[in-house]
Image: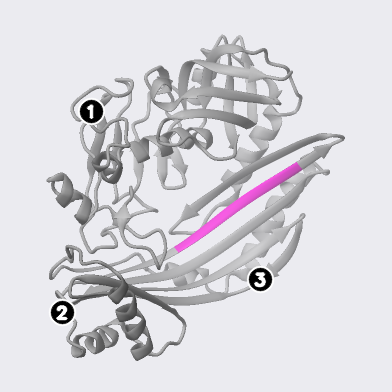
Amino acid sequence: MQPENLLDLVKKQGIKNAEVYQVESYSRPICFSANRLKQIESSQVSGVALRLWRDNKPGLALAYGEFTADDLIAKALAVSDLNDPEEIFLNGTNNLIYSNDDGNSKRFVDQDKKIIKEGGDAIASILDLYPEAIVNLDVEWERETTTLINTQGLYCQQKDISQSASVGLELVREEDFLGIYDGEYSHGHIDLSRIIESVLRRLEWAEKNVAVKTGKFPVLFTPNAVVTLWDTVTEALNGKYILDKSSPWSESLGKVVISPCLTLKQQPDLKPYDCPFDDEGSMTQNLTLIEAGVLKNFYTDKKTASKLGISNTGNGFRTGLGAYPSPDLVNLVISEGNKSFPEIVKNMNHGIIVDQILGGGADISGDFSFNIDLGYLVHNGKIQGRIKDTMLAGNVYQCLQKVSAIASDIVWSGACYTPSIVVDNISVVSDS
């Protein structure tokens, strides 16, 4: 059923405030497991979320695939009867239609043979150098359409065509296990050679194991690892946590909160993670969050902005089809430095590189104790080898006040566009 038809049926029942959120996707993953082609499959999913208010009481109901509209409406009304009244935040007559389908979908269709050959060649290039390696490789293209409409005249739709690839390599030598992971997301065709080159470079750095002593050293976080720090910062900038005073930066607007060498922005128009509107139908916007260490802005959805008495930033997103919109960030961008990664390493006298962190990150308090999944020792400006049984301890906010260098190697790590950074004097604990 089309969203418009469902909304018309809701209106006929006398409901004045309602919205329909629909996501339709078609994906085709090609999976290699343990160095061999495992499967090729197609997946098609359609889901709809109906949210309505009767007597200002909210009700939310979901359906996947084929569904009966009357049943879905009845479920939403039944949920509404159980809830307390609330203030309603619905956008008006925005008409926002976007698509990046410039023929990319045609390029991906019937590309199985090409992708299988490229995947096989990529795995072979690793096995030529490391025949004992176990390589898993997934390549997937996806077409997704998101539609949001409501009773106030809002109509938003985005069509997105993308391809993603991920590589996981495992190497077992006696009792020594090494795992290296990398991936990429794009609106166009992905060149696997960049990913393979990155994996092989890190394999070379990890050729031998070396010991590191417990102490305080400078730590170079690669883009893979530094995202863990930015995740905590993102929470601290969330208007919801500013509102309930759980963010340590609730009273810090206009104050220096991290190193003056750091500037953080939201840039929702950057590809491939471009996002023109949020899940409430508000336009997303470029937003300077922290400039030269000074806190400039928080990000909000409509409800949070209203309670804070500030303008909505257009950051109301759903964590899933059945979730209500809440503040979330789009395309966090950290300004890059002017030194290359090799130059940064060369300038390190004694320290470590952290490339993969095991487990979750710090909570909003910022306190952390990270096990290093993949890291390297640097001595006299050279990478000596891989470190094992080592962890970092400290506080994210304090660490970000001690940033001494920022590299120019800015890349996407998920939806975060970040360079490597060096943090001085982090506690390193080793069992070596």
Q: Amino acid at mark 3?
A: Ile
Residue denoted by label 1: 252
Residue at coordinates 55% horizontally, 52% vertically from top-left? 191
Label 3: which secondary element: strand
Answer few, some or many: residues within 10 Å of disc 3's Cα (few below 14, many 20 plus, some between 14 and 19): some
| Mark 2 / mark 1, whichever is N-terminal | 2
Q: Amino acid at mark 2?
A: Lys
Q: Nearer the viewer, mark 3 or mark 1?
A: 1
Q: Which residues are magenta?
A: 162-170
Residue at coordinates 35% horizontally, 46% vertically from top-left? 331
Is residue 222 within the magenta segment? no
| Spot occupied by residue 8 in the image (x, y as percentages of width and height) | 22, 87
Label 2: which secondary element: loop
Height in image: 118 above or below 112? Answer: above
In this view, the residue in front, 19 or 296, is 19
| Mark 3 / mark 1, whichever is N-terminal | 3
Query: Which circle marks residue 16 in the picture?
Result: 2
The image quadrant that residue 295 belongs to is top left
Q: Amino acid at mark 1?
A: Ser
The image quadrant that residue 334 belongs to is top left
Height in image: 306 above or below 31? Answer: above
Answer few, some or many: residues within 10 Å of disc 2's Cα (few below 14, many 20 plus, some between 14 and 19): some
Q: CA distance from mark 2 to mark 1?
A: 40 Å
Residue denoted by label 3: 40
In the image, 392: left or right of 207? left
Q: CA distance from mark 2 to mark 3?
A: 46 Å
In this view, the residue in front, 232 or 412, is 232
Query: Taken as a whole, is the magenta stretch helix, strand or loop?
Result: strand
